[in-house]
Image: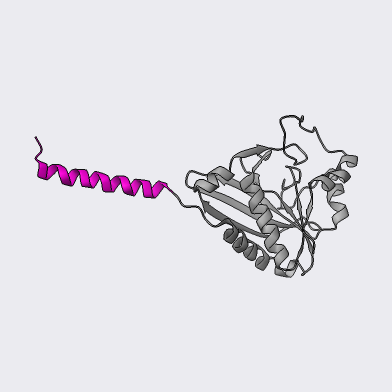
Amino acid sequence: MLSKASIIPVLLLAALSSCGINRYFDAKDADLIEVSNDVTDELREKAMRSIPKNSLILVSTLLNVNDRQETSAFGRIISDQIASSFHNSGFRIIGMELPIDLFSMKEGGTLHLTDEIKTMLKPYNGAVIVGGVYAAGKRNTYVSLRIVDLYTKNIISSTDISIPMGPDARKLLQSEKLNPDGSPISSDKAPAESLTPADSTKAPEETVEDYQK
């Protein structure tokens, strides 16, 4: 039988171990505004020679890497904050809900754009498009971002970041299903089958938020 003197250290050790485990798993949230500003600075610095000031930049909502028909409040807020950061740096910005296959890549690293997407983007005469994907892990969410030149279809800047999986991040990462045209699927509206050229010219009026000065 253990004596009182030997039981106390054992209990103390167990309590300290428990505190350590809780501290390890209870991740704190990162400041998403600061993260978005930092990542925008990195993207901009890498692409500085390719994007003249006052250029029009299209910013697409980030998508779930495991399902390109899903986004979340996390994907939307990061995209919006990146758009704001670019705008504050002197660029003209348009935020868009873009089709999920926008970033399909061909061999050689070139971007595949369908005729519908080309029709959708043509009225805005944008120089580049910013977009990417995220993947939620157990302790971190991993985000991959890129800037693509809309004329050459080449990636001109990219970066990767990880964000701690705190309680706010977990809440924001709840998924939202998207229609093929990039719009959210609502319970009272059937998913759209595909964009037609006629639909493509109308879609931006409903989904585009113009950040121009």
**Is 16 included in the stretch rendered in magenta?**
yes
- Image quadrant containing the C terminus: bottom right
Q: Residue at x 88, y 53 (%)?
A: 123
144 in relation to 1, above or below: below
The part of the chain drawn in magenta is: 1-26
Quarter holding the N terminus?
top left
User: Does the magenta segment cover residue 165?
Assistant: no
Q: Answer above or below: position of 16 versus 42.
A: above
Q: Is residue 149 left or right of residue 37?
A: right
> What residue is rendered at 62% in x and 62% in y?
37
Q: Position of residue 7 (x, y in %)?
A: 15, 42
For residue 187, above or below residue 33 = above
Residue 96 % position (x, y):
76, 50
x, y percentage for residue 177?
Answer: 68, 36
Task: Residue at 67% x, 62% y: name it.
Answer: 85
| Residue 10 picture quarter | top left
Q: Residue furthest right?
A: 198
Camera-side residue of 47 and 76 = 76
Q: How is the image coloured?
A: one colour
Residue 133: x and y in percent read: 64, 48
- The picture quadrant where one finds residue 175 is top right
**Number of marks:** 0
Q: Quadrant of residue 32?
A: bottom right
Nearer to us in this view, 86 or 189: 189
Above or below residue 209? Residue 175 is above
Q: Main secondary structure of the magenta part?
A: helix
